[in-house]
Amino acid sequence: MSIVKKRRYQMESKDEALQVVVRGTDVLNEPLLNKGTAFSLEEREELGLRGLVPPRVVGFEAQVARVLENYHRKTDPLEKFIFLTSLHDRNETLYYKVLMENLMEMTPIVYTPVVGAACQQYGHIYRKNRGMYISHHDRGHVREMFNNWNQEEIDIIVVSDGSRILGLGDLGANGMGIPIGKLALYVAGGGIFPCKTLPILLDTGTNNKELLNDALYLGVDEERIEDDEYYALVDEFVLAVQDRWPKALIQWEDFTNNHAFPLLEKYRDKVLSFNDDIQGTGAVALSGLLGAMRIKGEKLAEQRIIFYGAGSAAVGIADMIVAGIVEESGMSEEEARKLFWLLDSQGLVVKNGPRALQAHKIPYARDDKHIDNLMEVIKTVKPTIIVGVSGQGQTFTEDIIKEMYAHVKQPVIFALSNPTTKSECTAEQAYQWTEGNVIFASGSPFDPVRLDGKIYIPGQGNNMFIFPGVGLGASICQSRKVTDGMFYIAAKTLAHIVTDEELALGTVYPDLTKIRLISVTIATAVCRLAFDSGLAGIDEPDDIFKYVEERMYQPEYPRYVAAEEN
Ligand code: NAD
């Protein structure tokens, strides 16, 4: 049974009341409907709530104040996460109001870094169901399981198999924290309606012994399944999504790269889908590098770029930079790739090295001789840019950074590994070891750094700048697919939003508080591209920006009436 007869979606008048089918405690227990103490006396009468909530009708602002008072009483970040999760599970409108009004403070709690700790502890801090879990034991039943989800319209599904959660490795079913967190950012940042989001965890087992030995672990108590069974399950999942929610966009999230690349290739042209770790990361990093080039007054084609790490993020970023160089300088892709040196856990990625290369590394494999450590590569290459995407904390040591700085006045250092403990260096270290001359960005947030009386604001290369806008745009214009071109345009759009004042402070990303404007601007550019390339499934509106903006969710309580009988 649907909980409302008529949902209050974008096209309906804001003044129109929402006809609610359920009554009494069922209303209070449904986070998408619940207003808690803010139900008006009329609504209490209509919906059978008299006596079920305290007598005084409390305004939205007072509810927000109460939440913040309780939130600030907590000092432990994980406790803050648990508190916000409970609010999310109690009253979604209030949750999003609080989150959106305190985005800078709360994004690091609902997403990286604290979501990493929450995933590690998931079975221990678990309170209430959210999202759907599909395991290989559900093979043959996935489509019928989707009937258990009571929303008829889904815009965005974020799905993970928990195999590579941030830089924390295999967390199995505990990885569910990531799809939930990303979708919260979709709502807050991209204006997707909460009821049209669905987090999914594909439980394909875990090879994490600690979790398998943990009595409170909530996933399937087995090691990861073999590839044949794995791909069969993913296929069934994709087909079931297309049948139940044909308009839904699927975002692949935190898969190990041996599955991430094949899944992206398999579905990118057939299904509305993308991989945020590859494409979203590529776009956000390219945008930051375009900002760095503005600061330096140089071109990407003039750079020598080292990647520490050669997985999903590295190749996603490198491919996006190559696209930028080709457009900017007219170089061929092959020539552009010569500006890159990728290192993986074995050292420099070279053609005739000591071992066979995974397919995604091959385009970047160099003709050079193999070097097995970062310091030697830095000495040989004298890079102008170094990007850390290795998941290995504290690997950009003082020696490494000073060696790089010895050859370049304004080194660009992006230490992107998450969460904070895995960052290749801290912001403070990067500024200190380069006498404040670094152009720095990280994956997880760092506080401003004070050095010799000057304040530096480190940028956060947060994928949140990109994926909500891309997802929103692709979903609203009902694009048939999500293309690399959409991510490229998103990167350039984001780069344009960064002001000269922000660059002067050393930060290559805009203020996160502008996220709604960023997302609607990116979504508009994505729609424009979809219309121009014949991918869109709707007629082009006169004013795309306005069309998108009017369809974005705002956390406001609708007025409720009891559903009319019929
Ligand atoms: P991945 O597993 O696909 O790749 C990791 C790479 O690091 C592999 O190539 C591996 O060989 C290499 N590596 C491991 N140990 C190494 C070592 N000691 N020296 C050199 N290389 C080593 O993972 P990924 O998806 O590419 O993510 C990597 C990291 O980037 C994670 O910490 C993730 O959180 C972070 N990330 C950040 C952002 C962002 O900041 N916006 C986005 C995506 C990923």
Image (cartoon, rainbow, N blue to C red):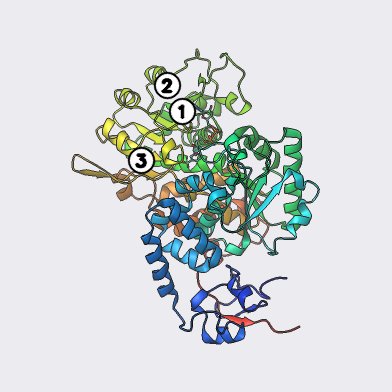
- Crowd class of label 2 (few under 14; some 14 to 19; many from 20; radius 10 Å): many
Residue under pointer 3: 294
For residue 317, above or below residue 46: above
Residue 374's label in the rendered image is: 2
From the image, tell me which residue sits under label 1: 308
- Give whichever of discs 1 and 3 has the lower sequence position: 3
How far across and down, in percent of the image, does residue 442 sit? 40, 40
From where the camera sits, is residue 520 visible?
no
Of 549 and 347, nearer the camera is: 347
Q: Is the shortest distance between ligand 1 and the CB of mark 1 under 8 Å?
A: yes
In the image, what residue type sits under mark 1?
Answer: Tyr
Residue type at mark 3 is Arg
In the image, taking residue 133 as reference, residue 296 lies left or right, namely left
**What is the spatial separation of the Cα atoms under label 1 and label 3, in whole angstroms?**
24 Å
Looking at the image, tell me whether mark 3 or mark 2 is earlier in sequence order: 3
Task: Identify residue type, mark 2.
Answer: Leu
Secondary structure state at the residue bearing disc 3: helix
Whether the residue under disc 2 has CB within 8 Å of ligand 1: yes
